[in-house]
Image (cartoon, rainbow, N blue to C red):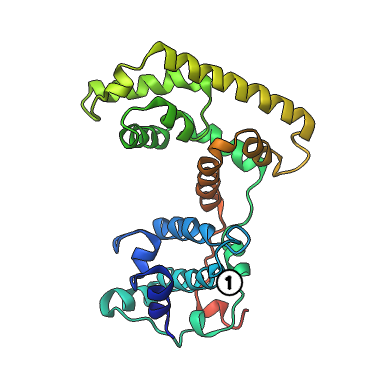
Amino acid sequence: MGLLDRCQELFKTASLYEVLGINKEATEAEIRRSYYKVSLKVHPDRAPEDPLATEKFQVLGKLYAVLSDKEQRTVYDEQGVVDEESDALSQDRCWEDYWRLLFPKITLQDILDFEKQYKGSDEERQDLLQLYTQHEGDMDAIMASTLCSSQEDEPRLGDIIRAAIESGEVSEFPAFAKESDKKKRARRKRADRERQEAEEMQKEMGLGQEDDSLAMMIKQRNKSREQNFNSFLSDLEAKYSKKSGKSQKARRGKK
């Protein structure tokens, strides 16, 4: 069975782009990021409840191999077919090794560097306004979803949103403009409790002993935000992943 047929069977669409949730005009970076996020959801080690996880993971690897190769992508875009005899699809490759080569594990320093660059950047502003619109001004949801944010950041983030409302860039939602003091106090109380739990766990875990200690600490102290944190890690891993300059021809013979 060919790649397109396998996509139809496993993902209910024969479109390589639809499987990744992107359009035909997607950039290489967008394809890479989407591949990471979708493949992470079906990674055999992270989706043991899915009996087809391994097959989906392998198909996604082949899909990315096609779309990341300029020649193969052009053929697919113009003719709607995939060269099943190409090296990328015909060789017996270990797709787990291929995936980890593209997306090596991030380190504690990567997280700290990202946070330093992200806060106050235009990227943070655009992400914040997108979340504001998505959650229709609900600051509980916005603060739970904003990367690298804490209670101390809320006044600054609120000012960014208010400025965007005044300029007409985004609409004013009642949930934001008329948020009750009771709700604000509850959010601060929750944040204080999480901070205390984080400090206690940091002492218990000896933060800094392992590269993954910060990730473990945040995930364990705040289960309600685990999905958002995983999304943060996926964005960061995609951002810091090694970009291979080798062509498909240069990789021939590797398994």
Categorize mark 1 by other alpha carbons within 10 Å: few (<14), some (14-19), many (20+).
some
The part of the image, by quadrant, that contains residue 111 is top right
Look at the numbered disc 1 and give the secondary structure of its residue: helix
Q: Quadrant of the C terminus?
A: bottom right
Question: Looking at this view, is 130 or 187 the one in front?
Answer: 187
Tell me if 138 is positioned left or right of 103 in this view: left
Q: Residue at x 43, y 20 (%)?
A: 156
Name, please, the residue furthest toward the bottom. 85
Name, please, the residue furthest toward the top. 181
Tell me if 21 is positioned left or right of 106 in this view: left
Q: Quadrant of the N terminus?
A: bottom left
The part of the image, by quadrant, that contains residue 250 is bottom right
Horizontal and vertical percent position of residue 92: 59, 82
Question: Looking at this view, is 247 or 55 the one in front?
Answer: 55
Three-letter residue code for mark 1: Trp
Q: Residue at x 61, y 25 (%)?
A: 194
Q: How many marks?
A: 1
Tell me if 238 is positioned left or right of 16 in this view: right
Horizontal and vertical percent position of residue 4: 38, 78
Where is mark 1, residue-wise?
Answer: 95
Q: Residue at x 37, y 27 (%)?
A: 138
Q: Residue at x 70, y 25 (%)?
A: 199
Horizontal and vertical percent position of residue 195: 63, 23
The part of the image, by quadrant, that contains residue 200 is top right
Horizontal and vertical percent position of residue 193: 61, 21
Vertical relation: 150 (above or below) 232: above
Question: Looking at this view, is 225 or 31 the one in front?
Answer: 225
Vertical relation: 173 (above or below) 23: above
Vertical relation: 194 (above or below) 43: above
